[in-house]
Amino acid sequence: MTSSGPRPRVNPIRCDGARYCAEIVPELIGLDEWGYPIVSPLPIDDPRLLRLAERAVGECPRVALQLSRLRDREG
Amino acid sequence: MTPIAVLAPPESPPVRIALAGGPRLLAGPRVDGPGETLAGHRQRLGRRPIGGDWLLDVIERSGLRGRGGAWFPTHRKWRGVSRLALERGPSVVVVNASEGEPLSAKDRLIAEKRPHLLIDGALIAAESVGADDVVIYLSRSSRRATHALRHALAERRGEERGAPRMRIVHTQHRYVAGESSAVVRRLNGGQSKPAFSPPHPSERGVLGRPTLVQNAETIAHVAMIARYGDTWFRERGTDAAAGSGLVTVTGNVARPGVYEVDLGSSLVSAVAAAGGVVSRPSGVLIGGYFGTWLSSDRGLEAALCPEDVSLGCGVIGVLGSDACGVGEASRIVNYLARESAGQCGPCVHGLRAVAETMARLTKGEADRSDVSRLLRWCDQIVGRGACHHPDGAVNNLRTALTTFADDVERHTCGHACAGLGARPLPAPPRSPFGWR
């Protein structure tokens, strides 16, 4: 059960709901009713989705979307 | 009003005494008198030991966990900061007594009545994690605590040679101002609003230095553990929650206040320490505004330890029989929505929408579809803020909707709220202006 793909993560302080990410990868990113992204926390292993996710990261006008290989620290 | 006997549910386990061997943090002079003087403190407990690496192991063995609400193992936080301080230079220790939770009073009580225990613990912590700067972080509205600590620091002037410098920093009294990244932002000259992590304050905190942000009660326990050791500490409490702890008992009890209990003792015994319930309770809120609502039967049976219920910041709010839990939950989520730092969309919009729907529900103007929408919003909001503010608010609300399902049902049939009863939980304060 080792998956090594990066996980999408939103910095919610930066994000102001531009919605580009959800248009580019609706498979991974949905929207709540106020237009803010709901991101699948699973690692992305499909190369096609990963390419799209990378594009979404690049298109985010607030640089709020990241792909992260780091696990969250507790505390 | 005379308290009636504590209503123990039928077939309940025998009521254990809240505090088998007398108080620890609250031992010494009466807590309704003036704060303990340096002379009194030294006579009672002796001089403080000097902190250092040795204490990290003692704290690990003691099983002490952070009492601010997260119950994170204290030694893990300390080791992280201590290691980084060795690599990168002196760290910073922050004693967090800001206590943004409106129902809690324990941290202020420690600061006011046992200021020297707090200062002892802070200096010991600083020596143990390699800090040369100690901050006591307080709400600006905690005037008595500020006064007591200033007085206590003055009593020690010229005493602690070579000890790290110590200062008091104030924040506006906001619910999230005590979140550790918000503390760091405030101390770096910004607003007391949470930041996106990583980096965590223990890695990059005040002035970029590794920073230990620790709740005031936890620091006071450290001052005792450093004196008496881990075996002594573990004589009380359970495996997952060692030692004694401070709880704030409020609402439908005869003598609301802060009480010390052995962790793992029954909730009934803590309520008994507060003089017992005044009328038959209809529900219990454990852990404050981020906490969990329990039915009165389940609530009074509960043991005060993380194995049984999440204690959070240690608030026990008892609701009277004539009170509506939905009404209380509505007040609370409305306050928490206003106390959002306003930074994250899901928190700002989600909590506002939830609070508006709850207000309509209490007036009998919402139907079942509104309730299912509430539950959907709750699921959506969780985990999507930079801090856990939206998660805590949703936890409170969700457990209220389950625990008071009958009241919810009545409200959806068009009945307005019966009211908050004779002894409601204290009203949420007004949200102040400003964030510094």
Image (cartoon, helix red, strand yellow):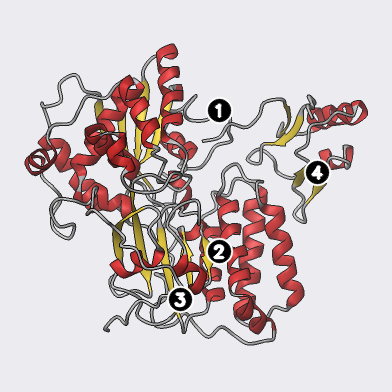
User: What's the distance in space between the residues labelled 2 and 1, CA to CA?
Assistant: 29 Å
Residue located 63% across and 40% down the image:
A13
User: Callout 4: helix, strand or loop?
Assistant: loop
User: Callout 2: helix, strand or loop?
Assistant: helix
Query: Are tags 2 and 3 found on a single chain?
Result: yes
Quarter of the picture holding the N terminus of chain B: bottom left
User: What's the distance in space between the residues labelled 1 and 3, CA to CA?
Assistant: 47 Å
Amino acid under disc 3: Pro
Return the mark for residue A19. Answer: 4
Question: In this figure, which residue is indicated by the disc labeled 1?
Answer: B199
Q: Is residue B61 above or below residue B31?
A: above
Marked residue nearer the N-terminal end (2 or 1)? 1
Question: In this figure, which residue is indicated by the disc labeled 3?
Answer: B9
Q: Nearer the viewer, mark 2 or mark 3?
A: 3
Q: What crowding class fits label 3: few (fewer than 14 Cα within 10 Å), some (14-19), or many (20 or more)?
A: some
User: Callout 3: helix, strand or loop?
Assistant: loop
**Parent chain of label 2:** B
Task: Please state which of residues B107 and B79 is positioned toward the viewer in this rendering.
Answer: B79
Return the mark for residue B333. Answer: 2
